[in-house]
Amino acid sequence: MTANPMAQNPSRPPFLALHHVTVMRGDFAALQDITLRPALLEKTDAALARLGIAHLAGRPVAQMSSGEAKRTLIARALVHEPQTLLFDEPSNALDIGAQIQLRDTVRALAKGGLGILLVTHHVSEIIPEIERVVLLREGCIVADGPKKEILTSEKLSALFGANIQIARRDGYYSLS
């Protein structure tokens, strides 16, 4: 199984347009004149279209919002055809609208058959398609199992040492 991690804070090389970033991995600082192979460009265009961001293809990443930059990273990962994507605190630094847009994007990917591994402190980020939840404290597993059994007020209160009330609506969880 292949997995591509999604960073909390995407780096924004100022001179690269989205087409360049989606086919690259690693440090972009030394890259300025990049020629893209047609096969990679085709995969890039498909990934951009899949995420509904084809209109951003020529825009430098430094001129994108945080939400657009996050979706750029997702497109970059999709070019490499992973079976699973790892999202680490994906809504960090996003406004409410961008959080909802990202959540919808992750849902669409999951519905399309892509495995999603989500690391988060926010129950509202957990999409309905995620079936299994693992609770960790200091690197140790505290609970592991079906979402309905694990995301309870009792278990989260014990985990965080606070009185936590959980509500569920339309497959989403929230603090109440």
Image (cartoon, rainbow, N blue to C red):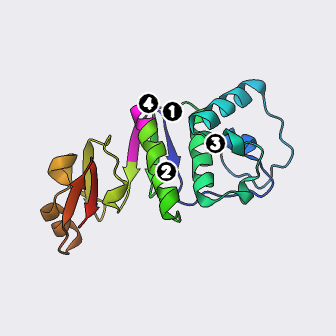
Whichever of callouts 3 and 4 sits on the residue coming sooner in the sequence is 3
- Residue 159 position by quadrant: bottom left
Task: Identify the residue position indicated by label 2 in the image.
Answer: 102
Q: Nearer the viewer, residue 139 or 59?
A: 59
Q: Are marks 3 and 2 in contact (CB under 8 Å)?
A: no
**Extreme residue in the left direction:** 154
The amino acid on which the numbered mark 1 sits, given as a three-letter code, is Pro
Q: Secondary structure at mark 2?
A: helix
For mark 2, does the 10 Å Cα neighbourhood hold few (<14), some (14 to 19), or many (20 or more) residues? many
Q: Secondary structure at mark 4?
A: loop
Rounded to the nearest whole Å, what is the CA distance between mark 3 and mark 4? 17 Å
Rounded to the nearest whole Å, what is the CA distance between mark 2 and mark 4? 15 Å
Rounded to the nearest whole Å, what is the CA distance between mark 4 and mark 1? 12 Å
Q: Is residue 22 magenta?
A: no
> In the rendering, at what x and y percent does residue 146 appear?
19, 44
Q: Is residue 110 magenta?
A: yes
Task: Identify the residue position indicated by label 4 in the image.
Answer: 112
The image quadrant where one finds the C terminus is bottom left
